[in-house]
Image (spheres, rainbow, N blue to C red):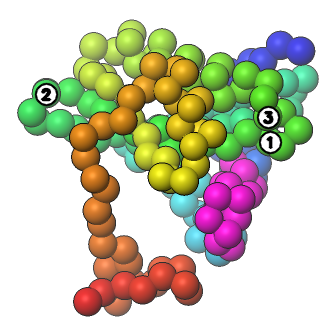
Amino acid sequence: MQLHIRRATPADAAVVADFNARLAWESEHKRLDPAVLGAGVAAVLADPAKGFYTVAERAGEVVGQVLVTNEWTDWRNGWYWWVQSVYVRADARRGGVFRALYRHLEAVAQADPTVIGLRLYVERENTPAQAVYRSLGMAEEPYFLMGRYPLPGRPGFPDEKGGP
């Protein structure tokens, strides 16, 4: 059955939030606060400066999604698009949904001369996902990800330690 790839709209907020909650549980065994998650999804859908969701539909139902956020690189004078919140509904996996979403984003990025690359992060142990990303032309980058989350005084997941 044919896939239709499109930019998400506010009407997709509930399914995007649901997919993000499923993603957090499946990938990290984390339960997201539905109010915080819903507000976060709504914020992206309301403000293109925060990013944009792209969804894949099959027979009128959303079966996959990705979030794209922007990172400006002064060294290269362009935007990296970070591919995030990748989720394909369980019954649609291994059917080319992510490949179609990625190829669509790649084409949109190539049409915009200010976008200089696509990036994503993947857990070191998730070798099946790494194989998919490599098959699409992505390669490991020479950077090691570091961060500080949550910032002192900010809420985080109950099982994560923040601060010094």
Taking the spot 47% from the left edge, 38% from the top edge, the residue there is 83
Front one among 112 and 91: 91
Is 110 magenta? The answer is: no
Image quadrant in which the C terminus is located: bottom left
Alpha-carbon distance for marks 1 and 3? Answer: 6 Å
The main secondary structure of the magenta stretch is helix
Q: Which residues are magenta?
A: 16-31
Q: Nearer the viewer, mark 3 or mark 2?
A: 3
Which residue is the site of mark 1? 89
Which residue is the site of mark 3? 93
Kindly check if marks 1 and 3 are in contact, taking CB atoms under 8 A apart as contact: yes
Look at the image and tell me whether residue 35 can be seen.
no
Where is residue 12 drawn, in percent x and y?
Answer: 72, 42
Q: Earlier in the sequence, mark 3 or mark 2?
A: 2
Q: Is residue 137 above or below residue 16?
A: above
Taking the spot 71% from the left edge, 59% from the top edge, the residue there is 26
The circle on residue 75 is none
Q: Earlier in the sequence, mark 1 or mark 2?
A: 2
Look at the image and tell me whether residue 122 can be seen.
yes
Q: Quarter-wise, where is residue 100 in the image?
A: top right
Q: Amino acid at mark 1?
A: Arg
Alpha-carbon distance for marks 3 and 2? Answer: 36 Å
Where is residue 44 drawn, in percent x and y?
Answer: 51, 49
The circle on residue 76 is 2
